Amino acid sequence: MAKNYTKEAAQVVTIAEDDSITDGSTSAIKTITYPHHEIHSGSSYHASDVQSVSTTTIKWQVTTPDSLAYAHMIFSVECTGEMLLLVTEGSNKVDGTALAEINRNRVGTPKTAGTIVTRTPTGGDTDGATTIFTTRVGSTGVGSKTLSGGGARGTNEYILKPNTKYVVSVTTYAAVFVSLELDWYEHTNI
């Protein structure tokens, strides 16, 4: 069985000598991405919603807990037509209809998310003064269209402030379906 070594401060340190850490055929160290690790640790969550929206605006609100476990979130919205997407920070609205926040690790009794996601927040007088993302995409009156936001975590992840409300607002220009997907993990910095 091969050993893997690295130099660290002029000392030779054994990294691994068994197949639980290295690949048996190449001796390469087995790794996964950090977000993938958060799934295994039970701190990764998903919330989604699909709504029929006709020439109006629909809103969802993300409320983060007053905690040091920060939500590392990717906002993804798809629409079957033209849409204006706006994500703002600092809402003072009341949470609306709760969506299910699903823990991606389904083994045993999964931990509950600290972050809350709701549809159609009410009251208040602002969706938030800080725009963190906006785009207008798609076409109205063109058949077979699906538009998508989101993408690679490295350029699309936002670390959300604790004890803060965010509004995801989608305005449509025809009768369409809008799909919201929120993916996040909750991590406490060391």
Image: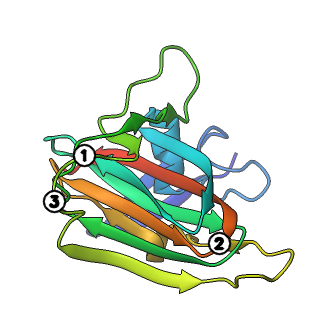
Q: Amino acid at mark 1?
A: Thr
The x and y percentages for residue 40 are 52, 36
Amino acid of disc 3:
Asp
The x, y position of residue 162, in whole percent, is: 17, 50
Which amino acid does the dot numbered 2 rest on? Ser
The reply, left or right, for residue 144 in relation to residue 128 is right
> Which residue is the site of mark 2?
148
Q: Residues within 10 Å of mark 2 (few under 14, many from 20)?
A: few
Residue assigned mark 3: 125
Vertical relation: 159 (above or below) 85:
above
Element under label 3? Answer: loop
User: Which mark lies nearer to you, 1 or 3?
Assistant: 3
Mark-to-mark CA distance, 1 and 2 = 25 Å
Q: Toward the viewer: 79 or 7?
A: 79
Q: Residue at label 1?
A: 64
SS for callout 2 = strand
Tell me residue 149's x, y (percent).
58, 72
**Between disc 1 and disc 2, whose residue precedes?**
1
